[in-house]
Image: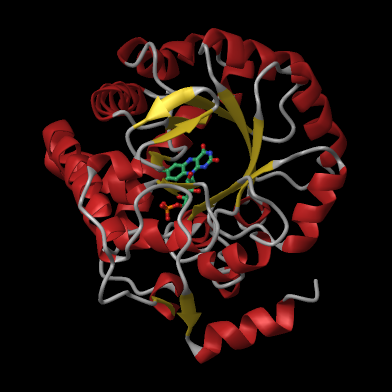
Amino acid sequence: MSQRSKRKEEHLALTQMFFNAQKTNSFDQVHLLRPALPESRVDAGSIKSSWFGKELAAPFFINAMTGGSEKSRQINQQLGQIAAKRGLALALGSASILTKEADQLESFYVAREADPDGLLIANVNPLTPPADAARIVSDLKADALQIHLNVAQEIPMPEGDRDFVWLDRMQEISEAVSVPVIVKEVGSGLDPVSLRKLQAAGFSWFDIGGAGGTNFAQIENSRSPYPMNYLNDCGLPTALAALLASPLTDRLIVSGGVRNPLDVFKGLALGASYVGVANHFLHTLLNEGAAGLDEEIARWQEELAAIFALYGQSCLPVKQPYYLDFELMNQFDQLKKF
Ligand code: FNR
């Protein structure tokens, strides 16, 4: 197994070791004003959505995780089958490995084979040569491309990148591909200063990928002989990142630490058009098998429709009054000038 494939499999194992379904996070600091008289009905149609020209059964999706190893081939195939059956969008893990190991294409393509008509999003790192990014999009028949920002992951990784001058290359990638591009953080949060810089460079879709769920600084520190554990809390919490980003864009994806359908609804209330879920779904798949994840997603869809009725929402976009715990409000007040 190559060094890169080995790292992919280590990430799979370590993200499960650190997964904690009970963990509190910034979604708990967001509260919703519930109408006692919602004048609503539970309706599966209320959560239907469309994105990049494809119809979706729900506004949450399976966010980028894996590809590039034998185990990840099996995972991507199962995720593709479930996404097809349940009408969800699916983002694949970083395909930049294909620039060095073209024979790993199959470990990603199995998802497209399993979900030929679904909304499939490819993912690359920001230094991927533009021609390679374009080939990845075309080989996977991807409907969109995520470019991930993961500085807080690279820094604690002894073999990680040390050059983070990325923007010019990202623009070249964007020009080389014919599909929409989403700039995405991986769990340490997209801040409003970077978001504005990205907007000025022409990017328009953002996944804030906030802190509160999978923590790649912590994961890399656990693999490192020289851990920088003091960086484990450097991330911008998801709810805070969403509050800061939502006035700046209406092409917002909220993700990072989404644990249940109420978190999905809170993400939508904070201004997201779509909500990304990564490790919670992976954990379910690895522990309860494909049938377990399929059931879990069906249940999330039913429960999200019920939550829509509870809060008097009959369709997207969600217009939901919320109020914040003092700590979150205070953090937001300090940062909103940026
Ligand atoms: C990830 N994530 C990720 N993100 C990305 O843009 N490219 C990638 O290749 C990967 N790889 C990856 C592997 C594994 C095993 C996990 C669990 C996650 C990050 C993911 O898309 C998401 O941004 C974070 O995990 C935060 O969301 P959750 O896990 O808290 O829902």
Say whether residue 164 is visible: no
Image point (52%, 22%), residue name: 53
Colour scheme shown: secondary structure
Say whether residue 25 is visible: yes
Which of the pair 159/98 is nearer the observer?
A: 98
313 sits to left or right of 272: left
168 sits to left or right of 8: right
Write down the quadrant of residue 214 in the picture: bottom left
Which of the pair 242/223 is nearer the observer?
A: 242
In this rendering, the answer to whether 38 lies above or below 158 is below
Write down the quadrant of residue 87 in the picture: top left
Q: Position of residue 70 (x, y in %)?
A: 34, 22
In this rendering, the answer to whether 259 lies above or below 330 is above
Q: Position of residue 2 (x, y in %)?
A: 48, 24
Image point (37%, 19%), residue name: 111
Write down the quadrant of residue 1 in the picture: top left
41 sits to left or right of 54: left
In this rendering, the answer to whether 196 lies above or below 234 is above
